[in-house]
Every structure is written in C-alpha cells, then in structure tokens.
C-alpha cells in the first residue's frame, strides 16, 4: 500500500471511530466514560513516522473536542498518549519491535498486549480526567476510581474490537 492510500485509510478509520464514539458511546454508561477512539492510537503501525502518528492522534482528539465542546482536552490527551506509545511498547516488549519490520500489536503475547493497552488507556484517561478537573467540569475526590474503572471499561471494549479484528 502506498503512502497516500495508507493516509486515506487512516482518515476513513478516524471517521469510523469518531462516529462510533459520538453516536453510541458518549450518551450512555452511567458515569463510566469510554473513550474508544484510543484504539486508533494503539493500532497505528509502529513503523509509521512519529510526526504522522502525532498529527493523526491530534486530529482525532480535536474532532472529539469539537463535537463535545471540551476545549482541547481530548486532543492533548490523545497526542500525549501517542507521544509515549513507543516508549511504553519498548517497556513491555524490549527492542523486539524495532528489529522486526512486520511487527504488529497483534503479535504480542496476550498478557503483554493487555498490559500495553491498559497502560496506554490509563495514561490517556489520567491526563484527560486531570484536565477535566483543572477545567472544573467535575470536582470529585474519587476521580482515581473513575480513571481506573473507566479504563477497565475502555479496555474491555478495546479487546472486543481487537478480537473481532483477529477473526
């Protein structure tokens, strides 16, 4: 697949994930937030240029911000997560992904995959909920529990998407 086709496929996938996020996942789930758009950041291939990953992550966060009127919180947290994605992968898999040109998140062992995804979700949700607290959207003494339980819920949805993709 050439460069333009790959970028166009990313844009189509962004539209799909944003539609899924805004139409189905935002209006429901009693206090548990599920930001499934993080699956896009997780699934971008590791060989993709870092600037492209950061721009696409910013774009998906910015689109969510525009629809939810959240003032850049999603854009910042998704860009921050994309920036540290390879460092977190390096922590869980060592340098194995650097030497393998065909590396995919799907090739990780199950427990490493779960830990990698959950760490990215925790980072994303932690940054997002801290920004929401600073912004004053909710002032709650138990926002750590919101981060943990919302991250678990998002992890479950991400794993459903991952297993669906592998079938």
Image: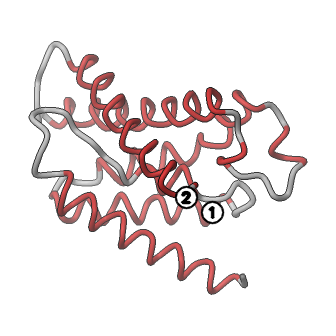
Residue 134 circle label: none
Circle 2 sits on which residue? 54
Q: Residues within 10 Å of mark 2 (few under 14, many from 20)?
A: some
Q: Secondary structure at mark 1?
A: helix
Location of residue 45 in the rendering, given as x and y in whole percent from the top left corner? 67, 58
Circle 1 sits on which residue? 51
54 left or right of 147 in image: right
Which residue occupies the extreme top position in the image?
A: 141
Residue pictured at 30% horizontal, 25% vertical: 147
Location of residue 126 in the rendering, given as x and y in whole percent from the top left corner? 36, 29
Alpha-carbon span between mark 1 and mark 2: 5 Å
Q: Is residue 163 above or below residue 101?
A: above
Which residue occupies the extreme front position in the image?
A: 167
Q: Secondary structure at mark 2?
A: helix
For the C terminus, give its image quadrant.
bottom right
For the N terminus, give its image quadrant.
bottom right
Question: Where is residue 156, by image quadrant?
Answer: top left
Query: Are circles 1 and 2 on residues that touch, CB within 8 Å?
Result: yes
Q: Is residue 28 above or below residue 109?
A: below
Location of residue 24 in the rendering, given as x and y in whole percent from the top left corner? 18, 57
Q: Is residue 139 above or below residue 79?
A: above
Residue pictured at 19% horizontal, 29% vertical: 133
Residue pictured at 90% horizontal, 47% vertical: 99
- The residue closer to the viewer here, 16 or 53, is 16
């Amino acid at each position: 697949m050439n460069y333009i086709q790959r970028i166009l496929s990313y844009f189509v996938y962004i539209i799909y994930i944003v539609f899924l996020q805004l139409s189905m996942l935002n209006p429901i789930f009693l206090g548990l937030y599920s930001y499934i758009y993080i699956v896009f950041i997780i699934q971008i291939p590791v060989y993709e240029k870092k600037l492209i990953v950061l721009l696409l992550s910013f774009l998906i966060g910015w689109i969510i911000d525009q629809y939810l009127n959240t003032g850049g919180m999603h854009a910042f947290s998704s860009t921050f997560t994309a920036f540290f994605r390879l460092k977190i992968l390096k922590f869980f898999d060592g340098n194995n992904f650097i030497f393998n040109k065909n590396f995919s998140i799907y090739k990780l062992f199950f427990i490493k995959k779960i830990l990698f995804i959950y760490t990215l979700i925790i980072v994303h949700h932690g940054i997002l909920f801290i920004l929401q607290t600073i912004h004053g959207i909710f002032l709650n003494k138990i926002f750590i529990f919101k981060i943990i339980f919302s991250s678990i819920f998002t992890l479950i949805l991400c794993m459903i998407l991952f297993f669906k993709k592998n079938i």
